[in-house]
Image (cartoon, rainbow, N blue to C red):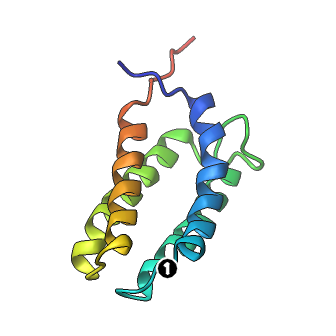
């Protein structure tokens, strides 16, 4: 059952972007590899920019089609799931990326297609 609408997704984007920037510091990420802290912050900044540029009701400039936004979200989820393996993130560093990656995959997979008028 797909229930995450474009509107719901838009409301999730801003808090997720800010969480990706703040949580690495609050959780003390980076003990297994400094990139564990840096990657999340960079992705958070990029996620904020993507949200500001996406064509949805909370987008400010609305130049990126929503379907491309979903594609970027999917790619970020894949990167987050693979990062602990590729970059040797261990412990909390690894769990942080796996949990976030799976969460984003779930949101993208539960996306409810828009009905054409």
Which residue shows up at 57% across the image and 36% down it? 9
| Residue at 36%, 39% in the rendered image | 106
User: How far from the left and from the top, in percent, is residue 79?
Assistant: 34, 65
* 30 and 60: which is toward the camera: 30
Vertical side of 100 occupied by 25: above or below? below
* Element type where label 1 sits in the image: helix
91 displayed left or right of 15 = left
Position of the C terminus, as image quadrant, is top right
Q: Position of residue 54 (x, y in %)?
A: 64, 47
Q: Where 51 falls versus 31 (above or below)? A: above
Question: What residue is pinned by disc 1?
Answer: 37
Q: At 31% across and 58% down in the image, what residue appears?
A: 78
Residue furthest top in the image: 117
Q: Nearer the viewer, residue 14 or 98?
A: 98
* Quadrant location of the N terminus in the rendered image: top left
Q: In the rendered view, does 45 fall on the left or right side of 28?
A: right
Figure quadrant of residue 18: bottom right
- Percent coordinates x, y for residue 103 in the rendering: 40, 47
Residue 112 figure quarter: top left
Residue plotted at (52% across, 68% down)? 43
Q: Is residue 21 left or right of residue 34?
A: right
Q: Residue 45: x, y in percent? A: 62, 68
């Amino acid at each position: 059952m797909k229930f995450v609408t474009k509107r719901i997704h838009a409301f999730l984007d801003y808090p997720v972007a800010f969480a990706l920037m703040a949580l690495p510091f609050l959780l003390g990420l980076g003990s297994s590899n400094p990139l564990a802290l840096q990657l999340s912050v960079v992705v958070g900044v990029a996620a904020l920019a993507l949200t500001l540029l996406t064509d949805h009701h909370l987008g400010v400039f609305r130049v990126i089609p929503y379907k491309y936004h979903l594609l970027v979200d999917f790619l970020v989820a894949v990167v987050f799931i693979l990062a602990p393996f590729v970059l040797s993130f261990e412990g909390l560093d690894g769990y942080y990326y796996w949990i976030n990656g799976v969460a984003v995959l779930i949101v993208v997979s539960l996306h409810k297609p828009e009905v054409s008028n």
